[in-house]
Structure formats: structure tokens, C-alpha cells
Image (spheres, grey):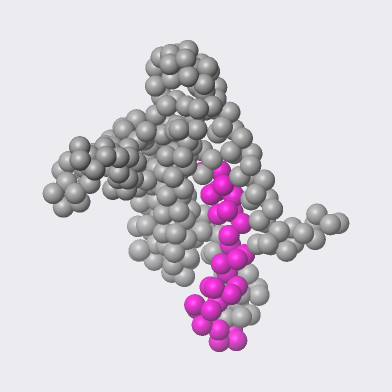
């Protein structure tokens, strides 16, 4: 039980975990969707000015600490540009209206998901671009290109599937680490999830809650990596052959 609230740790985590999973899933989905499109697009124009600029911003996004980005994003979009965005600086998934009662507040999800997705977006862009450039330089791709296959068909039929392995590995690691990395983001935005629960437990030296949160993150990390290992067999048939041998 919790030292502070005398509540079972399982119940406290069960109440907070869905909000964190929703936040991490939204952030990772945005990062993957945008990162794959941008990465494959840059692979078709390597060395161009746009390629260098985007990779530069990606490097900046990878190096920026999450708590700094959370403060900057909250201040810019929730305060300075609030009359354009209409987004609040903080808030949880549910808000209580005086007449309508509890209601879902999806607009509270936008800024924390955007902040949490910045670093994985930068990683996915770089990995996708570099992996696709390597695949485009292989002999079978050059042969297909010499036969007059269009760039779009070349990308969708020969490059995408073969370039996804490193991206999938990074995505699995980032999704699990988001559950732990959401601590500062949830604290800044007031998102009532497992990260905020763990932050308050650390403040109050509530060790059972801290250990419970860490255990959930560890189990999630192992489970996701096992699922990714199974997905490798679908993405790359050579994995099946090597395991069979």
C-alpha cells in the first residue's frame, strides 16, 4: 500500500496508467507517421538543402531535454499563441463542468503529446532517412531503377519494407521509455497519468508507488521488445531462415 494515501498501489497505478498509455501512444503515432514520411522523402533527395536543414532540426530535437521542451511548448502554444491555438497550458484527460459534469478534454492531449513526440520524431526521421539511403544504394534497387520503375513504386515495393527494421527497433525502445520519460512532461502539463503519480510519490518518498511504477515500465519494455522480435520475421524473411538454421 501507499505510505501516503494508504491506498493499494495496484489501484493507484490502474487509475493513472490509461492516461499515460494514451499520451505515449498518441505521441509515438504522430512521431512514426510524420517521421516515416519525412525520412523516406529525404532519402530520395540526399545531400539537398532541404535534407541538411531537416537533419539539422532533427539533431536539435534529439538533444533538447524533455522538461525544457515541455516548458517552451506550454509557454508558446498555451500562453503566447493561445488566441490562435486555443489550447490550454495544462489539464488532464477529464475536466469537470459545473453543469455537465465530467467530460473528456481531448484538447488537453495535444501539447503534451506534441512535446513527448519531439525526440522520437527526430530519431525516426534520421533512422528512416539513413536506412532508406542505404537500401537505395543496393544492387537490386539499382537494377529495378534501370528497368524504368517509377520512384514511388521503387520506394513502396523495394525500399520501405527493407528499411523498417532499425526504425521498428527504435520505436519499440522509445515507446517503453516514454512511460518513464513522461514524468516531467506530465508534471509540466498537469496530465494526470503514471508519470505525475511517480513524480508526486518521489516528492513524498512513497517508495511502494515508485517501485510499482518502475515495475510497470520494466514489464512493458520487455513485452514490447518481444513483440518487435516477432515482427522481424514478417519484415525480414532472413530472420526466419537464420533462426531455423
**Magenta span:** 146-174
Q: Position of residue 187 (x, y in %)?
A: 34, 30
**Residue occupying image coordinates x 55% and y 84%:** 149
Please state the horizontal and vertical placement of residue 112, each as a whole percent of the image.
Answer: 34, 42
In this view, the residue farthest toward the left is: 83
Chief SS of the magenta region: helix
Number of disc labels: 0
Dividing the image into 4 quarters, which one contains the C terminus?
bottom right
Instruction: Decide which of 235, 196 is in the foreground and name it.
Output: 196
**Residue 239 x %, y %:** 74, 58
- Residue at horizontal 50 percent and vertical 27 percent from the top: 11
Q: Residue 182 versus residue 190: which sits nearer the camera?
A: 190
User: Which residue corresponds to the image point at 52% horizontal and 21% vertical from the top-left?
Assistant: 8
Answer whether residue 142 is magenta in the image. Answer: no
Residue 151 covered by magenta stretch: yes
- Is residue 86 visible in the rendered structure shown here? yes
**Residue 142 placement, left or right of 24:** right
Amino acid at each position: 500500500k501507499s505510505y501516503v494515501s494508504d491506498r493499494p498501489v495496484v489501484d493507484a497505478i490502474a487509475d493513472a496508467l490509461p492516461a499515460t498509455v494514451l499520451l505515449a501512444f498518441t505521441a509515438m503515432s504522430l512521431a512514426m507517421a510524420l517521421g516515416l514520411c519525412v525520412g523516406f522523402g529525404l532519402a530520395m533527395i540526399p545531400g539537398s538543402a532541404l535534407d541538411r536543414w531537416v537533419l539539422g532540426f532533427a539533431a536539435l530535437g534529439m538533444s533538447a531535454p524533455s522538461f525544457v521542451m515541455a516548458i517552451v511548448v506550454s509557454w508558446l502554444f498555451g500562453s503566447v499563441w493561445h488566441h490562435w491555438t486555443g489550447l490550454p497550458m495544462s489539464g488532464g484527460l477529464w475536466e469537470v463542468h459545473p453543469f455537465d459534469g465530467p467530460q473528456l478534454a481531448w484538447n488537453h492531449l495535444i501539447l503534451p503529446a506534441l512535446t513527448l513526440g519531439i525526440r522520437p520524431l527526430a530519431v525516426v526521421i534520421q533512422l528512416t532517412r539513413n536506412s532508406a539511403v542505404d537500401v537505395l544504394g543496393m544492387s537490386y534497387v539499382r537494377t529495378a531503377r534501370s528497368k524504368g520503375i517509377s520512384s514511388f513504386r521503387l520506394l513502396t515495393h523495394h525500399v520501405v519494407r527493407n528499411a523498417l527494421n532499425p526504425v521498428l527497433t527504435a520505436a519499440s525502445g522509445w515507446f517503453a521509455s516514454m512511460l518513464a520519460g513522461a514524468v516531467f512532461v506530465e508534471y509540466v502539463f498537469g496530465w494526470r497519468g503514471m508519470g505525475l503519480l511517480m513524480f508526486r510519490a518521489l516528492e513524498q518518498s512513497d517508495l511502494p508507488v515508485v517501485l510499482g511504477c518502475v515495475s510497470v515500465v520494466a514489464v512493458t519494455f520487455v513485452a514490447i521488445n518481444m513483440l518487435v522480435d516477432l515482427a522481424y520475421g514478417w519484415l525480414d524473411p532472413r530472420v526466419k531462415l537464420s533462426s531455423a538454421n
